[in-house]
Amino acid sequence: MTTTGSGPGSRWRPRGRPASGDRFPWLGLLVGLAALMAVAGGALWFTFDWLARVASVKADQNAAIQGKDYVTAMLDAVKIALSIVAGGGALIALYLAMRRQRTAERDLRARLDAQVHTEDDAKARRVTELYTKAADQLGSDKAPVRLAGLYALERLGQDNPDQRPTIANLWCAYLRMPYLAAPSVSPRPGSPRPLPRGHRRTVIRHSRPAETSPKPATAQAEAVLERDVRLSVQRLLAKHLRPPEHDHDHSNYWPEIPDLDLTEALLIDLDLSSCVLPVVRMDRAAFSGNTDFRGTTFSGAAWFERATFTGTARFAGATFAEGAVFSGETLTAATFSGATFADTAQFDNTTFIKTAAFSGVTFTFSTFGGARFIGTARFDSATFAKAAQFNRATFTESVYFSSAAFTDSAVFDSATFVSGAAFINTQFTTAVFIDAQFSVARFVGAWFTDAAQFDSAQFTGSVLFDSATFTEVAQFGGARFSGTVSFDRAMFGSDTTFGGAWFASVASCTEATVLSSGAEALSSDWPPGWTCAVAEQTGETLRLVPVPTG
């Protein structure tokens, strides 16, 4: 097959079949020649006839044109006929020249197209050869050869942007290969030691005679070298996923990478800080050592389901543009301070072994259902734009939600707070703590703009609701207060009930007021030992006063 041109409008035609206007290139020439001969013949015939008549004509005194003038006029007519014939010949010559030029241009375009196609085919074959060779090098049993293959792929990607997604997929596939450090051998002074690996990994073994097995020292050296190869892969990914600090330098940034599939990969001291990541799949991945995603932008969905972090996981200042799934994973220490979750953040059944820092985080919709916080949990100044679910969550150590803002519902039903829980100056809309279990709880200065439900909650230690504000519903029905309780300077709405609540000691409600003058507030169930009365200074505002004795 061949083309009639290289532009977008060119069409493919079978080789050897010209276009409809080119099938009979001499047809126009033949027609022109026939017409020219006809004109010339007619002119000659007219001339010969005229000469014959002139020879026999006699002078006529009354004729408008006499003999000599008559001959001159006829000669002029012949000249005109001959001029027409000459002009027609010139037009035919011009047409032939145009045909030759058009044919030459078409042939030149055909040669150029064939050359371009040949160059493209040669380039494609060259890229395929380089890629295949580099991929074969990655399968070598020698670490230096594998490293050479990595950097050969990088050079290929630098020169061929369309190959970058494939190269990134190959690098990710290498990291997904199982790997386990060799049995520990006492190293010589100054020799590097590999990091420990997860129990489910197996060591990469390349082809070797069946009867031989590597010595411990040799296996240890191979494991160290393989670790270096893996670290090189991670560094290459970070290099090409990190945008330049200056707009004019984009040579190393590969925005063509559509996704990263690191499912079940073993990642050692991974550093992708300040990178812009596409869709990321790291489900069941094992993160050995410290992991750094500080300032990273996850432009696509991020999947970390059932991943394991043995070191500190740093996500401070990260931005998750789409959903982020951390469900079922285990983190030793995690820092998300200042991060932004623009979509759903799922931490259901996640285990935080040490400190979990979410201070200043901006959540949209967040779920921590069944999560276990074994260390300290900090959500100070966090913002929850939509529903936040902490149902069945367990906080073993202290948890801080001070100055946090819940603009939608905050659900803590059946949550367990083993140690102290601080909700100081926290802004709630709807707060649900039904069946929650507290030790020491601090709700000092908390503000509940809608319903506050503490039905059947259990408080085993001291509880402070000092200066808390309940503008609407406040339900403590069936709650149990085993320690000291203080509602000093608290403000209650008219729909407040403590019906069925149990207090081990008399609660303190000094200077507590009720934001209603209705009769229902006077008849509501209040903590034992307290009742509602009209404030003396206004005659309208209600306040809680001790029940008169005697």
Image (cartoon, rainbow, N blue to C red):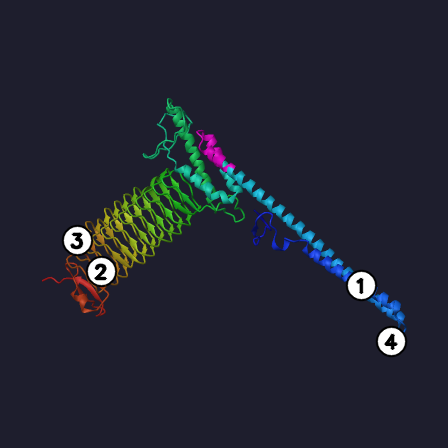
Q: Identify the image quadrant of residue 351.
A: top left
User: Which amino acid, by three-letter code, is at mark 4?
Assistant: Ala
Label 1 sits on a secondary structure element that is: helix
Circles 3 and 1: CB distance less than 8 Å? no
Q: Which residue is mark 1?
A: 45
| CA separation in Å, label 2 and label 1 | 124 Å
Q: Residues within 10 Å of mark 2 (few under 14, many from 20)?
A: many
| CA separation in Å, label 4 and label 1 | 24 Å
Say which label, 4 or 1, has the lower sequence index: 1
Magenta span includes 135: yes
Q: Identify the disc placed on residue 474.
A: 2
Whole-percent x, y for residue 29 in the image: 70, 56
Up-down: is 201 above or below 345?
A: above
Whole-percent x, y for residue 46 in the image: 81, 65
Q: Residues within 10 Å of mark 4 (few under 14, many from 20)?
A: few
Q: Which residue is mark 3?
A: 480
Say which label, 2 or 1, has the lower sequence index: 1
Query: In the visual, does 225 lie left or right of 512?
Result: right
Query: In the visual, does 40 lie left or right of 123?
Result: right
Q: Nearer the viewer, mark 3 or mark 1?
A: 1
Query: In the visual, does 463 lie left or right of 186?
Result: left
Front residue of 106/538: it is 106
Say which label, 3 or 1, has the lower sequence index: 1
Q: Residue furthest left?
A: 550
Which segment is the magenta one? 129-150
Front residue of 134/394: it is 134
